[in-house]
Amino acid sequence: MAETVRPLGESEIGERLAGVPGWCRDGDAITRAFGIRYHGGVALIVHVADVERLIGHHADIDLRWDHVRFSITTHDAGNKLTAADFDLAARIDDLAAAHGAAPA
């Protein structure tokens, strides 16, 4: 677990960001939006929340009528990026694809 709460260095962040295409760095967070209609977005959020509960790591989520946006950082690491953030991003990508969400 210590690996997931250790803030990543700049080179590590760059390497891991390359592994999750579509995610963008926004300061000490990574973000991505998916195009999906409102009720589909609600269903996606429910599935993401279930995975988040299981892994003990959570994204900030913004739902709009035509898209959902996720923002991830590790609060337990002083709001810095950690390996857990990139793991969650990859899981969100898989769930979004399963829900037919389009890259926004």
Image: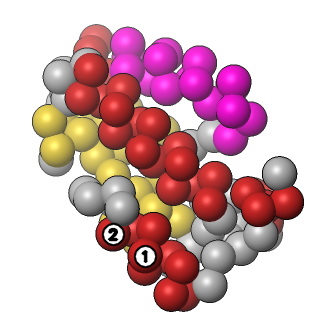
Q: Position of residue 96 (x, y in %)?
A: 30, 30
Question: Pointer 1: residues within 10 angstroms few (<14), some, or many (20+)?
Answer: few
State how the image is colored: secondary structure
The answer to whether residue 74 is above or below residue 55 is below
Residue 2 placement: quadrant: bottom right
Q: Are marks 1 and 2 in contact (CB under 8 Å)?
A: yes
Q: Which mark is residue 18?
A: 2
Region in magenta: 42-57
Give the quadrant of residue 43.
top left
Residue at numbered disc 1: 15
| 94 to 69, vertically: above or below | above
Quadrant of residue 40 within the rendered picture: top left
- 26 sits left or right of 85 in the view: left
40 relative to 50 in the view: left or right:
left
Amino acid type, residue under disc 1 in the picture:
Glu
- The kind of secondary structure the magenta stretch mainly shows is helix
